[in-house]
Image (spheres, helix red, strand yellow):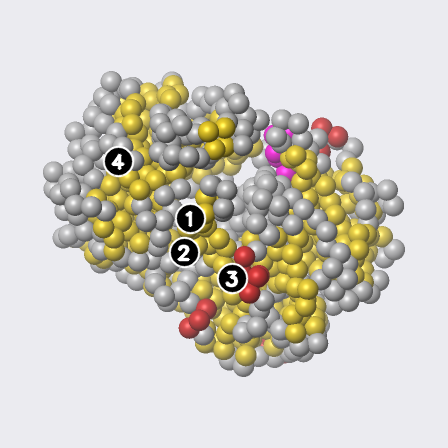
Amino acid sequence: MPASTVPTPPPLLPRRSLLAAGMLLGPLALTACEEGAEEEPPPSAAPAPPPARLTLAPLTTAAELMPEHPVRVREWPLSRTADRPLGLLQRRARSYEATLRVLTDQDPEGRDVPIDPAASTVAVDGEGALVRVLVGTVRDGEMVHTMHLSRDLVEWSTVELSAPIGRWALVAGGGLVMGDPRGTQAHGWRIDDDGTVAALAPVPVPDGATASIRSVARSAETIVAVLDMTTQGSSSPATVTSHDAGRSWGDPVPLPVTGERTGARHVRALTGGFVVTGVHRVTPSWSTEGFSRPTAWSSQDGTDFRQEEVPLPLWQRDGWTHDDIGELERGRPIDFRRIGADLPAVDADGGRLHQTMNVLDEAWVATRDADGSWHLDGGMLRARGVVQTSIADGDGRILLAAGSVQARGTDGRPLRGGSPVAPRRETTGTRGRADAAAAGVVAWKEDGLVDSGDGWYEEGRYRCLALRIAGERIEAVPDLPAEVEAWERPMLHALAPELCMVTGHSAPEDASVQARVHADGQWRAVTGLDADAVGWVGPLTTLDGRLHLAVVTGEEREGGSISWAPRIFASEDGIGWAPALEGPVRVAEEERASRGGGISCVAALGDAVVGIGAVVDEDEVNRPIVAIHDGDGWAASILPDAPTGMLDHLTRVGGEAVAWKAGDDGAVVWAVAADGSAAESYRATDRASRGPVLDLGDGVLLAGGWIDVAASEAEDGQQHGIGACIWASRDAGATWGATLLPRQAGRFPAVHLMQEGEEDVIVLLDDPDGPRGYRIPAARADVLEGGA
């Protein structure tokens, strides 16, 4: 199963959280509320034979919406050996094509690994004498894996595998490759250098839990895999061990933790045993706020891991003060801000492990010696820009900062750079209408250092371009107000060609609601949207002819935690706004809403006003709710067995109201009644995904999504395919069929559908380097008249 494209949402809105993207369904009493586009798919219902095939007319994307350089997707560490330098393997994307580029401390410009540009999955084992890169490509309806091997990162050989492995083999190490769990088991394989494949015993996942495999390592017969385990919305790291080369496994064992929000990322086999690296949040004695910092665990035999303390980087600036500490002395451990733990590297003899740590534009190295002790190694290296990722050992360092690779190697030359890349772009379309002043937003984050004027640096800024559909082109909106670029995650709302609104929130220090409305041919400021400490801004909805906007705000409590509350605003024209539908969220299980709750959007059902959202407990678990406004506030019911997080989507399909939620646990749909009750009507499997539905009338429904059925797995008459698609039904959802999107085999971008005029539908894809799209001319007729 592919890993979910909609990860479990963050706690309802940490103070600096990003806004989700709201999508509107047109002038209905119910409109869509949907999280921002994600990278990989959520599971959904099994596909049926197709009732229709869709006509897709490609749209051309204007150059101003595309980045200048390839988009950075991911990096893998490559430890130094006698035959190769320290390196990074970087995956990039551009114009539908994937590339892998080797970047070293001797050659930061790098060179490409000769992979198939249509590759959709990559797993890298960079610790042994041979670097092994396992690449998956969809061919003739099957995922086919090829292994590329190199000793020196210059010459590469290619080996075909002797037997198929799981489509979603994502983690490699120690000559092994592992896939994310399907159901209650995760699967793995040993792959020899000649391509011979041998299956391992399945790795068990406890009942009631979900898991993703983060890393795997092997020493002789002992294998250790690191899992991220999620139970009832709470996530924690665990290890699972085999002492007989994968013929059997023990049960997952949680890693011991002393801080909060602990995560484990990597495991490495050293001469003295196994070391796991990760992060946890620690609250210093002088503060009520916790800060993330590196941590580690070790075990000689892969069992009974014990936690180790990793030294913190040291403050290296003069003349700075901190509000709670006072003057910051040079050499003070940096316990007053987040410290990122990055990629580990292991010495060729397996004796020492080097862990990089990033602080703004600084990269530090903590080294673990063979005796298990840690120390700072080699001092601080300052990059030209915020360090986004890094790797180092005793002889060299490689940093990714300011959009390019910067390296210093064993030759002692100063930091030098090369091989520029661009940040991933996220495309979000307006739900419902593509014929307004704007039809979507392309957003990305540019990391940088800005002197805020009080001696402190701010990290990065969000950038965005609004897009519109102009004939057969996707082009940038030329007159979007310049200040919108400074908002965090702008969202676009469109009810009709005459009404378009963009919302967001200002810099995270105050996080106030911001909005502009396009009316009478121009963008105009709004009044009355007075809300600070914003964590969520929902989409526009219409109740009794008035526009409504749902906002969730936070208030800091004693001890530094945040309590959340709903704020609803109403407007006659989109320009002037006033509070409406006031009052808190209430649930019978008060302990499950001890930190309040929020409403993400509202709708009218008969005489009732219904809202959807989430409540939050002390452990920051978000539980989806459906609520009725009773005059005093929101009387809410927690949805049982629902994926955790803010409820995403409320719309009308075939005359019925439905709420939709996606997460790592899968997509779930509920039928919502006017009394605020909700009955589950659809739950995901791992065979396909259908997103929120666009109802075109006459029983014709469309939904973006994906299908994951290999040709060899399809039953008689069953449709098969692997990749992004558009689902269509012409019988009000009784049966569905998928039209696979061109050049998306093995790829799972979010698929946004929008109505244009009375007949056409616009398709926008969230490809990593910018928007791609299609038009479905006369979409309802196309579905009704299409082939079976």
Find the distance from the CA under tag 4 to the CA under tag 3: 36 Å
Query: Horizontal and vertical percent for residue 407?
Result: 24, 46
Q: Mark 1 points at which residue?
A: 449
Q: Kindly identify the residue that appears in the image at 60 percent across and 52 percent down.
A: 506
Q: Earlier in the sequence, mark 2 or mark 3?
A: 2
Give residue 737's quadrant in the image.
bottom right
Q: Which of marks 1 and 3 is nearer the N terminus?
A: 1
Quadrant where the C terminus is found in the figure: bottom right
Residue at the front extreme, as displayed: 319
Tag 3: amino acid: Cys
Of discs 4 and 3, which sits in the foreground? 3
Q: Residue 345 carries which label?
A: 4
Q: Earlier in the sequence, mark 2 or mark 4?
A: 4
Find the distance from the CA under tag 2 to the CA under tag 3: 12 Å
Query: In the shown orientation, is residue 110 left or right of residue 630?
Result: left
Q: Which of marks 4 and 1 is nearer the N terminus?
A: 4
Tag 2: amino acid: Pro
Q: Earlier in the sequence, mark 4 or mark 3?
A: 4
Segment tinted magenta in the rendering: 618-625
Answer whether residue 681 is visible to the viewer in this image. Answer: no
Q: Mark 3 points at which residue?
A: 464
Q: Residues within 10 Å of mark 4 (few under 14, many from 20)?
A: many
Q: How crowded is mark 1: few (under 14 residues within 10 Å), some or many (20 or more)?
A: some
Give SS at disc 3: strand
Find the distance from the CA under tag 1 to the CA under tag 3: 19 Å
Q: Residues within 10 Å of mark 3 (few under 14, many from 20)?
A: many
Tag 4: amino acid: Ala
Q: Which of marks 1 and 2 is nearer the N terminus?
A: 2
Find the distance from the CA under tag 2 to the CA under tag 4: 25 Å
